[in-house]
Image: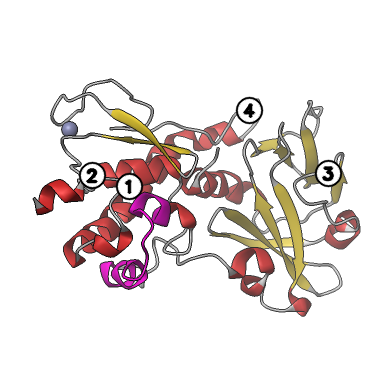
């Protein structure tokens, strides 16, 4: 599943090919994504200029100036298996290539075998796009200057749930999915079952710093795949970091050689080192 770094890398991959260009046509082959694609999308975007791209959480945002002078934002979510790539004008669409945005010199193509992704159109005459129902509920961005240890501490103080689940809930910070939650807790030597309310100020400070580092490292690593967005087979945008704990059940911890353990929290697999990340009760004992 694409996480925040993959979405940011996808944005960096497609952006140079579509920014300041005009959409000549849109072809929606299958509008049945997680939510139905706006039926008038082709009409709305005919001769629209792409002004810039941005991202909010795992939504890739394509800002458009329409031919009638209105402006709006395409909100693209990659779901479980979605990807974007730049194809040449003569490249025939393949299976699961659901939407094409056709420019003078290339095609932006949305591919999604499982169709859990979505493409929303938001007309800014209907209000600020950040107030869109899909975006307004999102927590703070990890790279926002306001995302600090103090912010995390304030959000954790009243919560009894585990920090692993707190990070995944998306309202403390967006973009920390299952992989990065496991990895960042290992880096901070915090047991995944530690209650949010039991975290110290120092642990919250460290978590905030390490979340920023980890996501930045992942985006930098994905930078090596940017060329794969052009004329590729649709598998672009997925990359694997070198993980310390994620998916390494039974393998030796890189720090202490103890076998990495797996457990299930909230129906999601958690991977951790029982030695490097001792349970908080053991710390108090
Ligand atoms: Zn260890």
Which residue is disc 3 drawn over?
A: 32
- Cβ–Cβ under 8 Å for marks 4 and 2: no
Q: Earlier in the sequence, mark 4 or mark 2?
A: 2
- Cβ–Cβ under 8 Å for marks 3 and 2: no
> Which residue is the extreme one toward the left?
285
Which residue is disc 1 drawn over?
A: 214
Give the residue drawn at x 47%, y 45%: 266
Give the residue drawn at x 56%, y 49%: 11
- Cβ–Cβ under 8 Å for marks 2 and 1: yes
Dot in front, 4 or 3: 3
Q: Earlier in the sequence, mark 4 or mark 3?
A: 3
Identify the secondary structure beneath mark 4.
Answer: loop
- Cβ–Cβ under 8 Å for marks 3 and 1: no
In the image, residue 240 above or below residue 179: above
Which residue is disc 4 drawn over?
A: 232
Identify the secondary structure beneath mark 1.
Answer: helix
Q: Main secondary structure of the magenta part?
A: helix
Query: Foreground: 154 or 134?
Result: 154
In the image, residue 123 above or below residue 23: below
Mark 3–mark 2 distance (CA, rounded to whole Å): 40 Å
Figure quadrant of residue 257: top left
């Amino acid at each position: 599943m694409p996480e925040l770094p993959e979405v940011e890398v996808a944005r960096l991959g497609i952006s140079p090919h579509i920014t300041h260009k005009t959409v000549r046509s849109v072809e929606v082959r299958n509008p049945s994504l997680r939510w139905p694609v706006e039926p008038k999308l082709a009409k709305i975007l005919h001769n629209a200029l792409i002004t810039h791209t941005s991202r909010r959480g795992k939504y890739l945002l394509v800002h458009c100036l329409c031919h009638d002078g209105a402006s709006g934002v395409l909100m693209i979510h990659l779901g479980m298996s979605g990807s974007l790539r730049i194809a040449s004008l003569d490249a025939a669409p393949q299976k699961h290539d659901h939407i094409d945005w056709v420019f003078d010199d290339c095609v932006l193509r949305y591919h999604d075998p499982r169709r859990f992704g979505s493409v929303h159109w938001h007309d800014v005459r209907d209000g600020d796009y950040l107030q869109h129902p899909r975006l307004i509920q999102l927590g703070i961005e990890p790279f926002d200057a306001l995302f600090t240890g103090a912010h995390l501490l304030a959000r954790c103080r009243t919560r009894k749930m585990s920090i692993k689940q707190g990070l995944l809930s998306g309202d403390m910070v967006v973009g920390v999915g299952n992989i990065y939650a496991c990895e960042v807790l290992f880096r901070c030597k915090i047991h995944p079952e530690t209650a949010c309310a039991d975290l110290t100020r120092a642990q919250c400070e460290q978590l905030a710093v390490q979340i920023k580092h980890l996501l930045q490292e992942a985006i930098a690593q994905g930078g090596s795949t940017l060329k794969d967005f052009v004329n590729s087979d649709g598998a672009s945008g997925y990359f694997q970091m070198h993980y310390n704990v994620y998916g390494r059940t039974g393998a030796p911890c890189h720090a202490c050689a103890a076998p990495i353990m797996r457990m299930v929290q909230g129906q999601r697999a958690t991977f951790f080192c029982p030695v490097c990340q001792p349970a908080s009760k053991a710390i108090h004992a």
